[in-house]
Amino acid sequence: MAERLITGPDLDDLAVGAAILGTGGGGDPHIGRLLAHAAVRADGPARLVPLENVPDDAVAVVVAMMGAPTVMLEKVPSTEQAALAVQTLTSYLGKSPTHLVCAEAGGVNALVPVVAAAQLGLPLIDADGMGRAFPELQMVMPTLYGIGATPMSIADEKGNRGIFDTVDNHWAERLARSATIDMGCSAMISLFPMTGAQAREALVPGTLSLCGELGRLVREARAAHCDPVAAVVERLGGAELFTGKVVDVSRRTEGGFARGEATLEGLNDRAGERFLLRFQNEHLVAVRDGAVVATVPDLICVLDAEAGTAITTETLRYGQRVRVIAAPCDPRWHSPEGLELVGPRYFGYDHDTVRVGSGALT
Amino acid sequence: MAERLITGPDLDDLAVGAAILGTGGGGDPHIGRLLAHAAVRADGPARLVPLENVPDDAVAVVVAMMGAPTVMLEKVPSTEQAALAVQTLTSYLGKSPTHLVCAEAGGVNALVPVVAAAQLGLPLIDADGMGRAFPELQMVMPTLYGIGATPMSIADEKGNRGIFDTVDNHWAERLARSATIDMGCSAMISLFPMTGAQAREALVPGTLSLCGELGRLVREARAAHCDPVAAVVERLGGAELFTGKVVDVSRRTEGGFARGEATLEGLNDRAGERFLLRFQNEHLVAVRDGAVVATVPDLICVLDAEAGTAITTETLRYGQRVRVIAAPCDPRWHSPEGLELVGPRYFGYDHDTVRVGSGALT
C-alpha cells in the first residue's frame, strides 16, 4: 500500500467514521476535526503511512487526549498542546521521533494525531492501538504485547508538563488520570514509545483508513437515498441488533467517567420489545428483552436511525430514534489476556463475553 | 565556619530538635532518624557544610518527603527512595548535583536529606528553606526569591517515578500532591534546583545545626535536672505562652492534611484559664482566654511539660500535660509577600499575624 495525504476534505469523513468506531465514547470528534482543519490549513496535510511500511528501527510514539470529552467541548485544547506533549516525551527519551501513532481510532483521538502530524511534519501510521475506543490508557493492544506506556508525557494548555515512568501500565493510567483531573479534566499525552517492529506487531492495521471509508459510505449512501446504517453494518461485518426510540437515560459522572444505562422501546418489526444499553463512556453491554446480545470488547454502536451518524453516550436523550449495531473487534481482544484487560468483568459486569459474527477487523 | 560530619550519635539530638522546630507538624522524625541511622551505618557519615561556604556555581537540589506523616509510620519509605528522587531530577536536568538542600528543618524532613547525603556522598548544606515546618511545597523562602520548584521529581517505594515542570510553584504543589496521594500518601521528592549563589540568598542559614543544638540542650537540661523547656525558650528567643492539660482534641483529615483544634485547661499559675490551638499539620494559631497570642509564621510549639520534647499534632491527646511556647520565625516571612504565602489568612483564619519577640532566627 502507498502513503497518502490527509487533507482538509478528508477530515469530515474521518470524523464521521471515528464517531462510529468510538462506540458511543472516545469523545465527539467535532472539536478534533476543527483542530485538525486548523493544523492542516496552517502546516499542510498530514502524511498517512501504511503500518507494513514502517521500518523496524522507527521511533514511534502515541499522541492522544486524556480526560472527559464533555469538558473538551467547553475547554478547547490549544493547537500547540499535542505537539508539546510529543516534544516533552521525545526530549526526555533523547530520541527524535520518526512516526506518530493513534491510540484509539474511535472518537476525538482519531483526529488528535492528525493535528500533531501536521504540526510536527511527522508521518502518522495508518493503524491504532484498539480498533475502537476504550476509556483507560492501558487498554491498548501494545499492553498485551508487553510494551510499556511509559515514559509518557502530559501537557496542559497553561504550559504545565509532566513525565511519568511507572512499574506497569495500570500505574501510568492512575498517575496520569490524577494529573489530568488537576489540569482541568483534559490534557494531551504522548506515550507508548515503540520501535517500528513493535508497532507492526502490536497495532491494529488500517483503522484510520477504515474511519475515512466509513464516513464516505455514510455520506454516499445518504446522497444516493440508500440506507447508511446498512452500509456501515456490511462494511464492518456486523449485525443490526435493534431499532427503537430512547425512552430512558440514566447517566452519572463517577470517577471521571460517564456511567449509566439507556432504555429503548422497539419500533417497526421490533415493536413491543425493549432494549437496554449499559455504558461507561463507551457502550459496553447490550441487552434485548432480558438476554445479553453483545458485549465489550466487540463494538456496540448507536446510530441515528435516518442519518447513520453515531450518537455518543453523553448526547443520548429521550425521544431519539436510533438503530443499534454490533461489530466484531480485533480478535486478539478475545484472548484470555485481552478479556482480562477489556472484557465485561473488568468493567464490573458479572457475565461472559457475547461475540458477534466475524468481520472487518478479524 | 567549618564543615563537619553528622554521625550516628548526632542523629538523636537532631531528631529531638527537628521535632521542636516542626511546630507540631513536619512528621515525627523518629522514622527519619531510623532511616538516617541505617544510611550512616551503611555509607558513612553525612557532611554538613555551612551555607556561606557553598560556591556560586554549586548545583544544589532539595530532597524531601511529601505526604501524610501519619501514613509514614506504617508505610516506611525504602532507604533508596530519597537517592532515587535526586537521581531522577538531576538526570532530567542533565547536571551532576554538588550539594543537597533541606526543605524544612522541622520534623522528618530534617532527617531525609541526611539519608540522601550519606547514600549519595554529597555534602548537605547547613540551612533549610523555612526555618520551621510548613505543609505545602511552595511555602519555602526560595519561592519568595522567584526560584522555581520545578523541574521536580517524585518517586515511590514501588519504583514509580515522575517529573513535573510547571508554570508556578502552586501548580507544582497541586500536581505533586495528587501524585503523592496516588502513590499511597507518601513519596520522596527532589525539587528547587538552584545555584550556590541562589542558595546563599534564599535559604535560612544554620538551621540543621540549630536542630542539633536544641536536642543537646534538652538532653543536657534533663541530665542536670534543669528545665528543658526554659532552655529551648531561651535559645530560640521565644516566650512561654501556657502550661496546661489537654482537655479536648478535634481532629479531621481534610484534603490530605490533619486539621483541627485542641483545648487546654490551665495548670499552676494558669489555673482557670483556657487555651486553644488551631492546627493544619502544624500549629498555626494560639488563643489564650479568647485573645490571639501567637500566629503563623512564628513558631508555636507544644512540648511535654516535663521532658521538653515536642508533641506532634497527630499525637495530641486528652490528659497530656504540656507547655506551649512561641518563637520568632525568620523575619523575611513577615514581609507582605511572605505573609501572602504563609500568613494566617492563607490558611483560612480571618485575622492578622501576631508576632512574638525577636530571637534566634532574626
Image (cartoon, coloured by chain):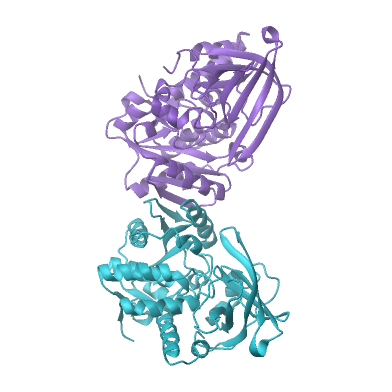
Chain colours: A purple, B cyan
B221 and B267: which is toward the camera = B267
Image position, residue B92 (x, y; %): 35, 56
In the rendered image, the vertical position of residue A193 relative to residue A322, given as above or below: below
Query: Total number of numbered labels?
Result: 0
Quarter of the figure that contains the N terminus of chain B:
bottom left
B100 and A214: which is toward the camera = B100
Asked where in the image residue A108 lies, by quadrant, the reply is top right
The residue shown at (55%, 22%) is: A20
Q: Is residue A86 left or right of residue A275?
A: left
Image position, residue B269 (x, y; %): 66, 90
B252 and B165: which is toward the camera = B252
The residue shown at (49%, 88%) is: B228
Image position, residue B200 (x, y; %): 41, 77
Residue A186 visible: yes
Residue B346 visible: no
In the rendered image, the vertical position of residue A182 relative to residue B347, given as above or below: above
Asked where in the image residue B279 lies, by quadrant, the reply is bottom right
Q: Is residue B47 left or right of residue B234?
A: left
A169 and B42: which is toward the camera = B42
In the rendered image, the vertical position of residue B250 relative to residue B321, given as above or below: above
The residue shown at (69%, 28%) is: A249
Which residue extends farthest front? B319
In the rendered image, the vertical position of residue A139 relative to residue A303, given as above or below: below
Q: Is residue B286 left or right of residue A138?
A: right
